[in-house]
Image: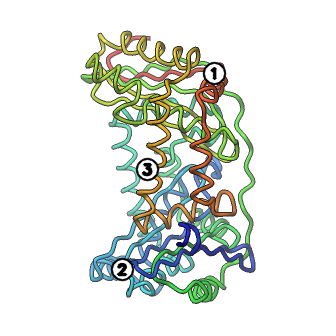
């Protein structure tokens, strides 16, 4: 019986281009992705939001396909096409019936290598992004996390809004966006990922041929952020709830402790059985939504906690959060809750392997960040190896750092 990773192959081509595939003969669908190693942390201040701008623009078409051609083509096969921008990469992906693999792959590669955005399209999409920024600024849970990130990563693009700012988006010219694309959408910065009933060598040959016109280019050189400064941030707004987030800087994607911190966040606020969900929502009814999360980057990261509550109950909610954090650091998790947290990761990983789109994204992200695909069993073994003592140690180290608190709502500083 083959292992989950037995049908995965990675090819490294001239100019640094990488292609990773997983052959699944039983799959009736094909998932295709192009991961570009540039995100908003790689943008100068005057181009803040350029990566996200390009994410929007590339689906406007190429020199041979209009945006309507792309939309009709995807709809005609019942597929889906989408993209997203993160702090460190931009991703374009499609899922189509297996017999339409060539169409899906051709479409994505075409808009990557031959974008046809005109000045008029840039101006039109600029207005869409400005509306997206306005929507985000009207959304308290977005505002509270934006302020938190700015203080966790002071004076560093990791703390910037992925969308950019109203000023930067308004001022960004079409020529500047094209130049950004030319600089970063190059062979050394691309990972193409395909999952389905495919032939690896045929996919590699097609990708290499279509992207032959791209220059090798170079990958982004990144500077690590300075240490965070303790801060209490208050944004008074006349709304019904007070939105509360706090965070600490933590380990990077390269650290061996990343698995420990992921498990710690899971048992702290990662699911229905987590401490914060049980104590804050189930037992006390203090909040409808409460969770913790970990954001990891190549050289840094952040552990964050979020909840929203009535203004007069904020102090109680904060007290419960502090109590649970202190108890975990002092006493560690119980044996059962640690088993539940580890089991949650194991189950989610295995269930994700059932979906071709999830598998494609996993392969692309692994190759882009680590230049290899971490075997599933290696990941599961690392999660299973996390002990209560590990959780105590790593949480203690993280919480000893600067704490940043962000509050949005009817509050006073």
Most extreme residue toward the front is 1
First-in-chain label (2 vs 1): 2
First-in-chain label (2 vs 3): 2
Quarter holding residue 385: top right
The residue positioned 34% from the left and 20% from the top of the image is 280
In-front residue for pair 152/342: 342
First-in-chain label (3 vs 1): 3
Local packing at callout 2 (Cα closer than 10 Å; few below 14, some 14-19, many 20+) is few
Task: Assign a secondary structure to mark 1.
Answer: helix
Circles 3 and 1: CB atoms closer than 8 Å? no
In-front residue for pair 237/240: 240
State the residue position of label 2: 28
State the residue position of label 1: 396
Q: Where does the C terminus fall, quadrant-wise?
A: top left
- Position above or below: 343 against 204: above
Task: Assign a secondary structure to mark 3.
Answer: helix
Which of pointers 2 and 3 indicates the residue nearer the eye? 3
The image position of residue 187, as x and y in percent, is 68, 74
State the residue position of label 3: 347
Quarter holding residue 355: bottom left
Question: How far apart are labels 3 and 1 at the CA level?
Answer: 27 Å
The image position of residue 297, as x and y in percent, is 63, 45
Which mark is on residue 318?
Answer: none
**Along the horizontal axis of the image, is 78 left or right of 147?**
left
Coloring applied to the structure: rainbow
Local packing at callout 1 (Cα closer than 10 Å; few below 14, some 14-19, many 20+) is some
- Position above or below: 283 against 4: above
The image position of residue 126, as x and y in percent, is 42, 58
């Amino acid at each position: 019986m083959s292992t989950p990773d037995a049908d995965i192959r990675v090819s490294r081509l001239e100019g640094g281009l990488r292609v990773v595939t997983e052959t699944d003969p039983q799959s009736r669908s094909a998932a295709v992705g192009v991961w570009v190693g540039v995100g908003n942390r790689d943008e100068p201040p005057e181009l803040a939001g350029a990566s996200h701008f390009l994410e929007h623009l590339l689906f406007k078409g190429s020199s041979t396909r209009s945006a309507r051609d792309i939309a009709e083509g995807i709809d005609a096969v019942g597929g889906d096409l989408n993209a997203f921008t993160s702090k460190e990469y931009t991703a374009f992906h499609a899922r189509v019936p297996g017999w339409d693999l060539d169409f899906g792959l051709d479409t994505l590669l075409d808009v990557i290598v031959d974008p046809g955005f005109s000045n008029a399209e840039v101006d039109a999409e600029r207005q869409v992004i400005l509306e997206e920024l306005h929507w985000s600024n009207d959304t308290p849970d977005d505002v509270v996390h934006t302020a938190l990130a700015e203080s966790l990563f002071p004076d560093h693009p990791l703390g910037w809004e992925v969308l950019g700012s109203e000023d930067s988006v308004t001022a960004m010219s079409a020529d500047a966006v094209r130049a950004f694309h030319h600089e970063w959408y190059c062979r050394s910065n691309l990972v193409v990922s395909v999952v389905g009933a495919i032939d690896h060598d045929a996919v590699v040959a097609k990708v290499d041929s279509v992207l032959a016109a791209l220059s090798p280019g170079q990958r982004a050189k990144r500077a690590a952020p300075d240490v965070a400064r303790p801060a209490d941030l208050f944004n008074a707004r006349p709304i019904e709830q007070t939105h509360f987030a706090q965070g600490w800087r933590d380990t990077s994607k390269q650290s061996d402790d990343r698995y420990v911190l992921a498990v710690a966040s899971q048992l702290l606020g990662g699911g229905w059985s987590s401490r914060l969900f049980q104590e804050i929502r189930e037992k006390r009814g203090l909040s409808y939504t409460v969770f913790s999360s970990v954001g990891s980057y190549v050289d840094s990261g952040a552990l964050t906690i979020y909840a929203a509550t009535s203004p007069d109950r904020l102090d109680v909610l904060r007290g419960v959060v502090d109590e649970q954090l202190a108890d975990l650091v002092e006493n560690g998790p119980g044996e059962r809750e640690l088993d539940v947290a580890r089991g949650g990761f194991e189950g989610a990983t295995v269930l994700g392997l059932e979906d071709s789109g999830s598998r494609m994204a996993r392969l692309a992200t692994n190759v882009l960040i680590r230049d290899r695909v971490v075997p599933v069993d290696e990941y599961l073994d690392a999660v299973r190896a996390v002990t209560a003592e590990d959780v105590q140690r790593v949480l203690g180290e993280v919480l000893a750092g600067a704490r940043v608190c962000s509050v949005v709502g009817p509050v006073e500083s």
